[in-house]
Amino acid sequence: MNSPQPQPVVPAPRQSSYDVVIIGGAVMGSSAAWWLTANPDFDGSVLVVERDPSYEFSSTARTNSCMRQQFSNPLNIRISQFTADFVHNFREHLGGDPEIPEIATQLFGYMYLAADDAFAERLRTSQQLQESLGGGTKIMSPAEISETYPFYNMDGVVCGSHNLVDEGYFDGGTMFDWLRRQARRNGAEYVTNEVIGIDHDRQTVTSVTLASGETITCGHIVNASGPRAGDVAALAGFELPVEPRKRFTFIFDCAEDIGQDVPLTIDPTGVHVRSDGDAFLAGCPPFEDGRVDYDDFSIHDDIWEEKIWPAIANRVPAFERIKVTNKWAGHYAYNTLDHNVVVGPHPDVSSFIFMNGFSGHGLQQNPAMGRAVSELITYGEFRALDMTPLGYHRILAGEPFVETAII
């Protein structure tokens, strides 16, 4: 008979009470932890509870690290503008220590392609808004696109919306790593555990229960649990329409030298493609885009053969001769109401803070969201950007936050 294997000992939190318990330690939880502990007006204690410290299957680890300014809602545009500033001045934002690296970027822009007049008009309306807020978006005719990017096939394209200012991708892994490091250096405590219970008195949170058995009293809870956010909210008795949705990424080499970077191109088919260093990256949602199991990261190879490759080879004929070198599936923390973040307090239990449902925008929105949560906990209000329109009240009312630029 085989002897039972000893179970690893899970270190308990150092304290039995914390001012803030953050559920989830990936980029959102670590952003909130860093902004709180870096705020000179916050003098409380922070506990970050993360169920998987490898972060292997987190949305953060499987992101494509993109950022863009091309949104249709002014608040999302301002959030993105702050992200660009944070990325470009990362070391200064984190205190100026020479050990902190600069964040690498590749800013070749996004290219939205319209195949009909209705979508073209949406792009034009959004471009006017983006320009009014200081954005660099330009509407390009098919001829202008072909002149600038001759590798495209422009058949069926009415126009494109393109911006080379602060759009492309950045080294999100380094950002996450240093937010977590600096949060720890500032005093935030990280534990490997899982929150299995949340108690409140219908006005304020009182405690969380950990899978290891401890009950931790607390003043605030931040739900930063990614695709599991709906389950965490349910522990407190709250409904939150956030669920895991699968997204696919394929990395490939091209036999032909295109000669220039491919902007992150959103094809009318719904497939997107861009340069990725010396290679290229393409992806899209599954054929049936619904909730998946938390541990389902299987690859659907048929989507490459039947959807992605035909679409990108049509749009960039050089992509007829390519070789896939890597592929993976990740999970969006998908807000089924309106595909936008829910950030802010529960209207009744105000010390329960939502930070959920980014639907693919999380990494590029984390700097503004961490700052917002820090402000809310420290001052009782949003200060730098008013995030109220993104609050939980719209979930209760069933009133979507309108944003048409969703990928």
Image (tube, rainbow, N blue to C red):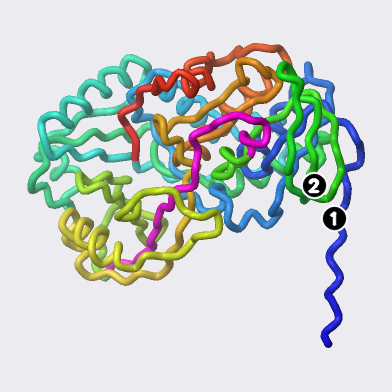
- Nearer mark to the viewer, of 2 and 1: 1
Residue type at numbered disc 1: Val
Give the residue at x 47% y 45%.
332
Q: Earlier in the sequence, mark 2 or mark 1?
A: 1
Where disc 2 sits, the SS reads: strand
The image position of residue 321, as x and y in percent, is 22, 70
Given residues 179 and 330, the one toward you in this image is: 330
Residue 191's disc number: 2
Residue type at numbered disc 2: Val
Q: Contact, CB < 8 Å: mark 2 with mark 1? A: yes
Where disc 1 sits, the SS reads: loop
Q: Is residue 312 above or below residue 7?
A: above
Judged left or right of residue 317, residue 382 is right
What range is drawn magenta here? 232-254
Q: Is residue 367 magenta?
A: no
Q: Is residue 148 visible?
A: yes
Query: Split into 4 quadrants, where in the image is the N terminus?
Result: bottom right
Give the residue at x 81% y 34%.
186
The image position of residue 220, as x and y in percent, is 75, 25
